[in-house]
Image (cartoon, rainbow, N blue to C red):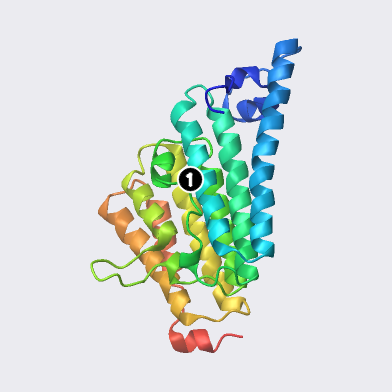
């Protein structure tokens, strides 16, 4: 599949993505038959490729086959990684497939938690691409979109009371205390803050996600002071890291610090409606 992929410039179905990224991009006024054929063929392949996974994952949900769902998630990420590794002139095709795959992975993960096929966070392996922090640091086109889909998933899982310390951190593994995927990504974003705007925007998205989780724990039906505290720890850690690494964004540091100061004590939290 990877070896036969055309260049991005030959696929007019991806022009909308190019227009969003390339400031000087101009839509072509006409298309050659070959370009039409390649674009149509790409659409057929990707739709069939994604449909096959969607069909199998849907059956895994129906028959409560956790291991099949996990395997499909892992294989989707592996195939996308192969495209990334070998598709040197296909960054828009790469972005298209990563974004569509992450949407599918998040959607089926939510269904699996809702149907109790996944009962704890550790059941849902591979929700983010392998070495995803490197994708963010390299400013990959898809990285922020993939991160946002994951953040939305966590917010949705919170509403099901299926968000646990696997996601939010605080698990004691003896030699270290976990931070959760989002916490680990936040750490990498702070360390690499100066690399590019994608890293900076991803850090903002992570902070905003923790803020939303805090607000939901205070006003929502799910009342979990232990997880509420875990969110506070994640934000405190981000502030400490930003100060330590001398991030040149005093407004962000101060606003996050002020937000952390608004967390309730256990007594105050339990008195909330």
Q: Nearer the viewer, residue 243 or 181?
A: 181
Side of 133 relative to 120 (left or right): left
Residue 63, given in percent of the width and then of the height, sits at: 67, 65
State the image quarter where residue 92 is shown.
top right
The total number of labels drawn is: 1
Quadrant in the rendering for residue 199: top left
Q: Quadrant of residue 10?
A: top right
At x 57%, y 70%, the residue is: 158
**Residue 264 appears left or right of 239:** right
- Residue 174 in the image: above or below residue 137: below
Residue at the far left in the pictured view: 175
- Provide the secondary structure element on which disc 1 rests: helix
User: Which image quarter holds the C terminus?
Assistant: bottom right
Q: Is residue 2 visible?
A: yes
Q: Quadrant of the N terminus?
A: top right
Query: Left or right: where does residue 38 sit relative to residue 255?
Result: right
């Amino acid at each position: 599949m990877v070896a036969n992929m055309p260049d991005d410039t030959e696929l007019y179905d991806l022009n909308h993505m190019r227009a969003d990224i390339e400031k000087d991009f101009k839509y072509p006024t006409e298309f050659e038959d070959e370009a039409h054929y390649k674009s149509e063929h790409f659409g057929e392949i990707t739709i069939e490729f994604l449909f096959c996974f969607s069909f199998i994952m849907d059956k895994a949900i129906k028959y409560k086959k956790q291991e099949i769902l996990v395997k499909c998630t892992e294989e989707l990420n592996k195939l996308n990684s192969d495209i990334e590794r070998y598709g040197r002139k296909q960054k828009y095709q790469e972005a298209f497939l990563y974004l569509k795959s992450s949407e599918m992975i998040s959607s089926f993960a939510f269904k699996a938690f809702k149907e109790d096929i996944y009962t704890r966070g550790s059941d849902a392996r591979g929700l983010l691409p392998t070495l995803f922090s490197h994708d963010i640091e390299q400013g990959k086109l898809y990285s922020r979109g993939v991160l946002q889909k994951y953040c939305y998933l966590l917010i949705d899982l919170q509403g099901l009371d299926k968000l646990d310390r696997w996601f939010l951190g605080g698990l004691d593994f003896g030699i270290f205390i976990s931070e959760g995927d989002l916490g680990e990504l936040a750490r990498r974003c702070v360390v690499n803050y100066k690399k590019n705007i994608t890293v900076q925007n991803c850090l903002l998205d992570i902070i905003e996600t923790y803020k939303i989780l805090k607000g939901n724990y205070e006003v929502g039906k799910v009342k979990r002071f232990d997880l509420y505290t875990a969110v506070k720890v994640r934000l405190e850690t981000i502030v400490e890291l930003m100060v330590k690494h001398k991030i040149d964004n005093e407004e962000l540091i101060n606003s996050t610090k002020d937000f952390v100061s608004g967390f309730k004590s256990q007594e105050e939290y339990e008195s909330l409606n």
